[in-house]
Image: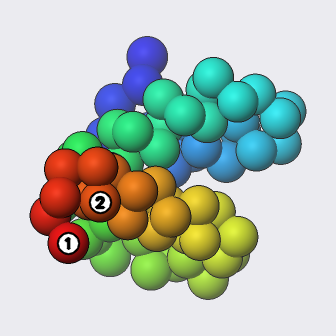
């Protein structure tokens, strides 16, 4: 079950198995619940280990923001 506590792990797994549906679901949850995921001490370690996934998160967040006309 995808939730804020495992979203980064699910994103990582989706990358390993090349599952676009799982990747999209994880990215959506991370973007929508960023305070619980991105603004945590564990995210910094994740970013060091998986910078390419942080790029995907950043792009998803910017895409979401532009669709919602936040930026």
**Horizontal arrangement in the rendering, residue 39 relative to residue 57 (left or right):** left
Label 1 – label 2 distance at C-alpha = 6 Å
Q: Which mark is residue 20?
A: none
* Residue 48 in which image quadrant: bottom right
Q: Earlier in the sequence, mark 1 or mark 2?
A: 2
Residue drawn where x is 48% and y is 37% of the image: 26
Residue 54 in view here? yes
- Residue under numbered circle 1: 71
Tag 1 secondary structure: loop
Give residue 25's position: percent from left, percent from top: 48, 29
Looking at this rendering, what residue extends furthest in the top direction? Answer: 1
Give residue 57's position: percent from left, percent from top: 49, 60
* Residue 40 in which image quadrant: bottom left
**Residue situated in front as seen by the camera: 14 or 66:** 66
Task: Give above or below for 10 relative to 35.
Answer: above
Crowding near pointer 2: few (<14 within 10 Å), some, many (20+)? few
């Amino acid at each position: 079950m995808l939730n804020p506590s495992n979203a980064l792990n699910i994103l990582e797994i989706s990358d390993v198995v090349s599952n676009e549906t799982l990747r999209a679901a994880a990215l959506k949850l991370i973007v929508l619940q960023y305070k619980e995921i991105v603004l945590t001490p564990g995210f910094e370690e994740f970013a060091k280990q998986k910078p390419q996934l942080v790029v995907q998160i950043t792009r998803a967040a910017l895409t979401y923001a532009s669709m919602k006309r936040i930026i």
